[in-house]
């Protein structure tokens, strides 16, 4: 690991990637990766007031200018543009994530219209539709709708009641654990469990990692996503000192519990992706590795934007001048800000390139790299934490592979078909 004392500010007078020359990239032989995941902001408001929310509590306050719901006309444009993009790039599968704000606030009719329209226009394409909800409104009526429309459901939950209610509260200050638990119990009942996509948990250092993990496991989720709180070099995350590895230590504790279980209890996406990368496989997550990011957001007003977590960096960080009523998604692929997330190691700072885990870490989640003056060509604000976690996982895997190799070598060798032992025991 290169010792990191601060961001790389000498790259350009303009904040990177404003200076990225996409035409030059194309001339060099680079080609953009088609978009495969489309995040649709069905509703721009929320029924909670989580104090760490990147949408409402951080730098970008653009939600105030957005219409509350995505109109049917905008949904029609979105479906047409996705179909156009899929046909142009011969895509046979697409992922749609219904998001917000809180997407359930869009109501039954709007959700039904959106999913039905998308399935109709994208007929012949394998379409995976999911919704990410805070779970408070997840009642039997919504679950019947999602079962009818074949929509998978992801729920945000930060652990046990104490961990959940510390940050995920209503504007009145009322906690939400009881309501979310009730929604999850309905979702995990036998008739709806097949819809359960998993849990999303934002890390809080005040929460005990083992207690948090066990509380999430209670619902037997197929997948758990642990999210580092959004922050950057201008606005560091809570409890971040820049010199310790508190978040890395927190995640290591859960990794050891997860990895050491006698049988697989769930998939933890971050750990699974790190293991894939250590084994030489490409990442399937934007938070780790150097694989091209093929995600785009459509806001309630039809604006085509970058991933919404960029709103944590500065006002307008996720915005573009594109709109589904007039612009194809291919136009987004040629924007410097989106191309920058598809060029792998060329997007890394010199410090990251020199790091021994650069191909695995990939500088972490893109929004976490921001610093005014240099933009996004910096290591993650979680640099030390990611190094701690990744090298720990690498060490555990290396030790296990060595043990397995020795055990295999010491096993009695079978006789060859001729009845004589083969040379070298092979």
Image (tube, rainbow, N blue to C red):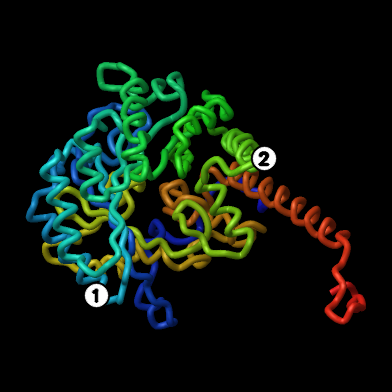
Cα–Cα span, label 2 and label 1: 45 Å
Q: Which residue is mark 2?
A: 260
| Left or right relative to 270: residue 13 | left
Q: Quadrant of the C terminus?
A: bottom right
| Left or right relative to 318: residue 278 | right
Q: Mark 1: few, some, or many residues within 10 Å (few <14, many ≥20)?
A: few
Which type of secondary structure does the marked residue at label 1 adopt? helix
The answer to whether residue 381 is above or below residue 134 is below
Instruction: Give the quarter of the image for residue 127.
Output: bottom left
Position in image of residue 36 (x %, y %)? 33, 63
The answer to whether residue 27 is above or below residue 318 is below
Instruction: Give the quarter of the image for residue 15.
Output: bottom left
Position in image of residue 74 (x %, y %)? 11, 55
- Total marks in image: 2
Q: Is residue 115 visible?
A: yes
Instruction: Give the quarter of the image for residue 177.
Output: top left
Q: Which residue is mark 1?
A: 87
- The residue lying at 14 percent from left, 40 percent from top is 108
Position in image of residue 267 (x %, y %)? 52, 46
Which type of secondary structure does the marked residue at label 2 adopt? loop
């Amino acid at each position: 690991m290169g010792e990191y004392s601060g961001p790389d500010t000498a790259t350009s007078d303009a904040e990177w990637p404003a200076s990225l020359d996409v035409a030059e990239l194309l001339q060099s032989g680079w080609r953009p990766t088609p978009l495969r995941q489309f995040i649709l902001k069905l509703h721009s408001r929320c029924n909670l007031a989580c104090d760490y929310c990147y949408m409402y509590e951080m730098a970008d306050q653009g939600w105030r200018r957005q219409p509350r719901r995505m109109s049917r006309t905008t949904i029609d444009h979105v479906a047409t543009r996705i179909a156009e993009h899929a046909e142009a790039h011969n895509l046979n599968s697409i992922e749609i994530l219904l998001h917000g704000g809180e997407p359930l606030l869009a109501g039954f009719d709007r959700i039904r219209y959106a999913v039905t329209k998308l399935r109709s226009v994208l007929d012949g394409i394998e379409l995976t539709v999911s919704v990410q909800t805070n779970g408070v409104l997840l009642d039997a009526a919504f679950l019947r709708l999602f079962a009818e429309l074949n929509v998978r459901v992801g729920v945000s939950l930060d652990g046990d009641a104490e961990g959940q209610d510390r940050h995920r509260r209503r504007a009145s200050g009322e906690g939400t654990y009881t309501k979310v638990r009730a929604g999850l119990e309905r979702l995990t009942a036998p008739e709806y469990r097949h819809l359960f996509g998993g849990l999303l948990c934002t890390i809080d250092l005040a929460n005990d990692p083992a207690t948090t993990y066990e509380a999430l496991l209670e619902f037997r989720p197929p997948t758990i996503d642990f999210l580092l709180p959004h922050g950057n070099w201008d606005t560091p995350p809570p409890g971040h000192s820049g010199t310790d590895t508190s978040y890395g230590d927190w995640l290591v504790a859960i990794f050891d519990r997860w990895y050491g279980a006698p049988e697989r209890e769930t998939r933890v996406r971050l750990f699974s992706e790190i293991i894939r990368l250590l084994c030489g496989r490409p990442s399937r997550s934007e938070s780790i590795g150097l694989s091209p990011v093929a995600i785009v957001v459509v806001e309630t007003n039809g604006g085509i934007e970058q991933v919404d977590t960029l709103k944590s960096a500065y006002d307008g960080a996720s915005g573009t001048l594109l709109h589904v009523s007039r612009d194809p998604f291919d136009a987004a692929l040629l924007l410097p800000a989106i191309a920058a997330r598809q060029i792998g190691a060329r997007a890394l700072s010199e410090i990251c390139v020199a790091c021994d885990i650069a191909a695995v870490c990939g500088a972490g989640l893109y929004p976490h790299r921001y610093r005014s003056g240099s933009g996004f060509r910096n290591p993650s604000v979680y640099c030390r934490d990611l190094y701690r976690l990744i090298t720990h996982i690498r060490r555990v895997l290396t030790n296990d592979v060595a043990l397995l190799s020795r055990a295999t070598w010491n096993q009695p060798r079978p006789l060859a078909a001729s009845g004589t032992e083969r040379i070298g025991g092979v």
